[in-house]
Amino acid sequence: MLVGGNGINEAQGPHVAAMIDDDRDGKPQADGRHGRSRAKDQHQLLIAFGVVNAIAAVAVHLVAGATLPLLPFLLLSLVAVAYGLVGQAPSGSGQGATVALATPPGRDLQLRRLEGASGEPSVPVVPLYRQPNALRRHRVLDPLTDLPGRDCLAASLARLIDEAQGQDEQLALIAFDIDRMKDINGIHGYAVGDQLLRIAARRLEGIARDGVFRLDGDRFVIIRRGVAGIADAEIAAVAALDRIARPIRLGKATKQEMRPSASVGIALYPDHGGDFEALMRCAEMAVDDAKRAGGRRCRLFDRGMIVAMQFRKDMERDLLEAIEAGDLTLHYQPQIDLASDRIIGVEALMRWTHKERGLIPPTTFIPIAEASGLIKPMGTWLIHEACRTVKTWQTMGLDVAMAINISAAQLRQQNLPEIVADALAENGVDACRLELELTESLFVDPSELMMRRSLEHLAEMGVGLAIDDFGTGYSSLAYLKRLPVQKIKIDKSFTQGIGREEVDEALVKVIIHLARTFGKRVLAEGVETPAQHRFLVQEGCDAAQGYLFAKPVPFAACTRHLEEDAERYGRADAIRATAG
Ligand code: C2E
Ligand code: CA
Ligand code: CA
């Protein structure tokens, strides 16, 4: 059974046992639907008029005899009924698709009109842009969602801009991009992906007054006329976002739900542009900004986005050069076992010294690398470099584990386990000396299933897995049970609240307890003060990392830390000497 909201079925895809949209809420729908019902009423009136006229003519003829000429009345009736029937002829879509355009997108789209005696249209017939089948025939409607596309949007917007100019009115162009569509297709299959797009289209139609359009792939646009300002446009965008994000249950047999989300960008006429091209560029820039910020959010275009885009482009070009020139380096930050006080591992953190701008923080260049795909070659280099360093230290009698950060794009690389295996084999490093740190948000990603295979493969190889920045992501902890993760890293924002914020202290305690319950080791990041150190020891935290012990430093400086540690505690295998 299809479940959810008010439990009304959506069209079902062939491979989807059941997917539902809880959206038909009986609110006034888009203009197209009203237009069609008005036209339908008029056609029914014509038919009724024809029938009544014919009956009356025959009755009068019978009563009055041959004195009343019957033929002209019957002809009139015939014409009325014929027009009525022609106008009512079903469009044949059978899917109730609604094309929500406020105004015809162009003269050429209005094929049929009934002409009155004066030559002016006297009876409005369903215009073509409101006839899904006719539009489809003319390739104006997208066959998947029954929505008009980019050309219609351009024509509609041009027309609305003309009207708005005359009335000193503002328009909003609101662009939507379904988050993680690629993953949804990859995990659930294209039938589910298509179904999601159809549902998103219907959900947007349910809320858009002035037109919904599907551009390429998973990008939709709605137009809103007469917006009273930024806040008004944002309210409309957020309402649409909320609608799209309603859960969708997958299949009859499963209770599994999909929670789609979207990134939304708004551009306003006339503030951000005077024509379709300019407004569309702004709206898409705003969507991309929302996507980069993690999706499921709404952004209003602002001019700073152009500057930021140029900066990203420059950085991307320079980053590519830096990779090729070997200008990226690694710094290493020791990780301390709190029971023995020994260095048990180091975290490798990437550094980039730009030829003109100097040191660029990873929080700036890693997102650029992720968005551009450069993170893959960078990540491969990092894995090899990290293994080389472990080997070099081992030959010096310094035995530590190496933690490296892995981003979502790398984890989605199907051959990540092979890349890791190659790097380990090439350097003769044992898999247990390498630990991959993955941020918590990766685990609630819809592509989790796909990534899980990689993680399981890596875990089987003996590579360690840790959850980074724990506590900053999402509330679902189910993945702790499911995934082969051995360590949790408490985010530094909580560690730094120790001694200052009771809530943070409580959270740190809970996370330590949680880790113990699930049989995981726990490391606190960002330890800067002796008080934080004491608190963590007292609460039974396994390990710590932070400026109190050592900052991230280049290879030579980290080697000195390891040697001092070895001097103090002996050159025994540090990892075997501790619980790790
Ligand atoms: P992260 O993985 O959470 O790394 C820890 C960050 O906290 C590092 O910042 C480190 O320098 C900083 N940190 C360590 N101890 C302290 C402390 O006591 N106080 C404070 N305030 N900060 C401390 P960094 O090196 O700037 O890296 C920032 C982020 O960039 C990393 O966060 C990680 O998400 C990302 N990153 C760095 N290197 C790589 C990499 O090679 N690959 C990927 N995918 N991401 C990386
Ligand atoms: Ca990390
Ligand atoms: Ca972290």
Image (spheres, grey):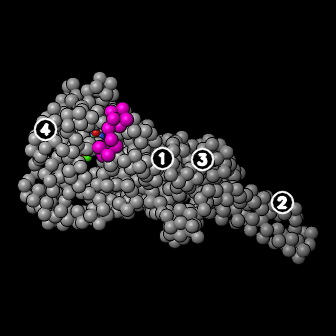
Closest to the observer: 232 or 123? Answer: 232
Res. 97 visible in picture: yes
Q: Earlier in the sequence, mark 1 or mark 2?
A: 2
Q: Where is residue 248 in the image (x, y as percent from the top left)?
A: 49, 62
User: In the depicted view, which residue is nearer to us: 557 or 507?
Assistant: 557
- SS at circle 4: helix
Q: Which of marks 4 and 2 is in front?
A: 4
Question: Tag on residue 182?
Answer: 1
Tag 3 or tag 2, which sits nearer the N-term?
2
x and y percentages locating residue 182 in the rendered image = 48, 46
Q: Which residue of the protein is positioned furthest toward the right in this rendering? A: 66
- Spatial CA span between label 4 and label 2: 108 Å
Q: Which residue is under mark 2?
A: 75
Based on the displayed image, in which of its 4 quarters is residue 392 positioned?
top left
Residue 77 as seen in the image, left or right of residue 389: right
Q: Earlier in the sequence, mark 1 or mark 4?
A: 1
Q: What element carries label 3?
A: loop
Indicate the quadrant where residue 533 lies. bottom left
Q: Nearer the viewer, residue 18 or 42?
A: 18
Residue at mark 2 to residue at mark 3: CA–CA distance: 39 Å
Q: What residue type is labelled 4?
A: Glu
The disc label shown at residue 141, or none: 3
User: With respect to residue 34, does 291 lie above or below?
Assistant: above
Q: Horizontally, is 95 left or right of 292 in the view?
A: right
Residue at image point 51% right, 44% down: 217
Nearer mark to the viewer, of 4 and 3: 4
